[in-house]
Amino acid sequence: MADSKTMLDMLEKVCKKYQITEVSSNLRSAFNTFVSTDKNGDGTLDKEEIESLKLGEKTNKEIFTKADGDTTETITLQELFKFIFLPNIKQYWKTLFNALDTNNSGYIEADEMETYLVACGFVGAETEDAMGVIRNYDYNNDKKLSFEEFSEFLEDDFDRLMNDLVPAALNRELTFIAEN
Ligand SMILES: [Ca+2]
Ligand SMILES: [Ca+2]
Ligand SMILES: [Ca+2]
């Protein structure tokens, strides 16, 4: 199956957000594999569908222990992406952190978080919004985010982004396949 345009749009948004320069071919092929393996078209991969990939029993087990975050014994595309893509994305987070830390303090303060929120398309983000994000992840209460705290924020943020973008991309893709 050819790469879908909607999927590429989605990947470009993801990459832009995390300042990654190119769309990962891993992610594209993961998406294609997902769609072609989901034989009953319910948008998740169950055990039988995973087994049809013939990855071997060990890998099958690993997929369900590591990727099945909500332990429903089915793998959603969000879970698969997180499993495959998050480790790749994480390597860019230090670069992003350093780029945002414009005063070189080694921490993300409210004004720097505000810049990030605006850059991510949160139009009209104010210091109070940035403070809100910082409060949620500021485990040692010093009113700024260390790299570890910032990474936790990005990980949750990645989940939210996947939950927003994946169902839309997947629905359009499945409709496209049904129509053709
Ligand atoms: Ca299925
Ligand atoms: Ca700083
Ligand atoms: Ca802190």
Image: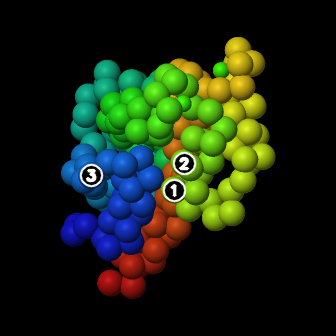
Which amino acid type is shown beneath numbered disc 3? Thr
Q: How far apart are marks 2 and 3 (CA)?
A: 17 Å
For marks 1 and 2, give the CA distance.
Answer: 5 Å
First of labels 2, 3 by sequence position = 3
Instruction: Of the two numbered discs 1 and 3 on the same chain, state the one appearing first in sequence.
Output: 3
Q: Nearer the viewer, mark 2 or mark 3?
A: 2
Judged from the image, the secondary structure of the residue bearing numbered disc 1 is helix
Q: Which image quadrant: the C terminus?
A: bottom left
Most extreme residue toward the bottom is 179
Q: What's under tag 2, amino acid-wise?
A: Tyr
Residue named by callout 2? 116
Q: What residue type is labelled 1?
A: Ala
Q: Is residue 165 above or below residue 171?
A: above
The quarter holding residue 107 reads: top right
Which quadrant holds the N terminus? bottom left
Label 2 crowd (10 A; few <14 / some 14-19 / many >=20)? many
User: Residue under circle 3?
Assistant: 21
In x, y percent, where is residue 132?
A: 76, 40
- Drawn side of residue 103 relative to residue 30, left or right: right
Q: Is mark 2 on a helix, strand or loop?
A: helix
Horizontal and vertical percent position of residue 48: 41, 43
Please tell me how many numbered marks the rendered image carries: 3
Identify the disc placed on residue 119.
Answer: 1
Q: Which colour scheme is used?
A: rainbow
Spatial separation of the CA atoms under disc 1 and disc 3: 16 Å
Report whether 121 appears left or right of 93.
Answer: right
Can the viewer see residue 50 in this picture? yes
Q: In which image quadrant can residue 136 be found?
A: top right
